[in-house]
Image (cartoon, rainbow, N blue to C red):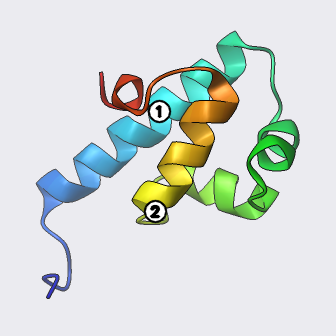
Amino acid sequence: MPIDPLPDWVLRERRRLGDRIRGLREERGLSQERLAELTGLSRHTVYRIELAQYGTSIDHLALIARALGVEIVALFS
């Protein structure tokens, strides 16, 4: 069961992941709306992931990685 509130280090990792997704998306010239279309997620979900407002699932990360043309591990490096 997750700790509430989450420790700062978890939130930092969430922000780092969101920043990485945003960077990859921008490198590819994609808008949040276009990434949402490619993944089947809502634009609001993409927005919340990028801003670290949302603890996303591995399923969402797999969809995002495929839409960005990278292996899922690239989202964490």
- Residue 38's label in the rendered image is none
Q: List x then y, in percent, for residue 75.
A: 41, 30
The foreground one among 50 and 77 is 77
> Helix or strand or loop: what does disc 2 sit on?
loop
57 versus 65 height, above or below: below
**Residue 28: quarter of image:** top right
How far separated are the C-alphas under marks 1 and 2?
A: 14 Å
- Foreground residue among 5 and 61: 61
Does label 1 or label 2 sit earlier along the sequence? Answer: 1
Task: Name the residue located 47 percent from the left edge and 33 percent from the top edge.
Answer: 19
Q: For the residue labelled by badge 1, is the local secondary structure a helix, a strand or a loop?
A: helix
Where is residue 63? Give x, y as percent: 61, 46
Q: Is residue 41 left or right of residue 75?
A: right
- Few, some or many C-alpha atoms within 10 Å of disc 1 (few <14, some 14-19, many ≥20)? some
For the point 69% across and 33% down, the residue is 67
Quarter of the rendering occupied by the N terminus: bottom left
- Of circles 1 and 2, the one toward us is 2
Q: In what quadrant of the picture does the C terminus appear?
A: top left
- Residue holding disc 2: 56
Instruction: Give the residue number, with chain letter if any, for mark 1.
Output: 19
- The answer to whether 56 is drawn above or below residue 50 in the figure is below
What residue type is disc 2 on?
Thr
Q: Does residue 15 appear anywhere in the picture?
A: yes
Question: Are discs 1 and 2 less than 8 Å apart at CB?
Answer: no
- Tell me what residue is drawn at x 39 percent, y 39 percent: 17
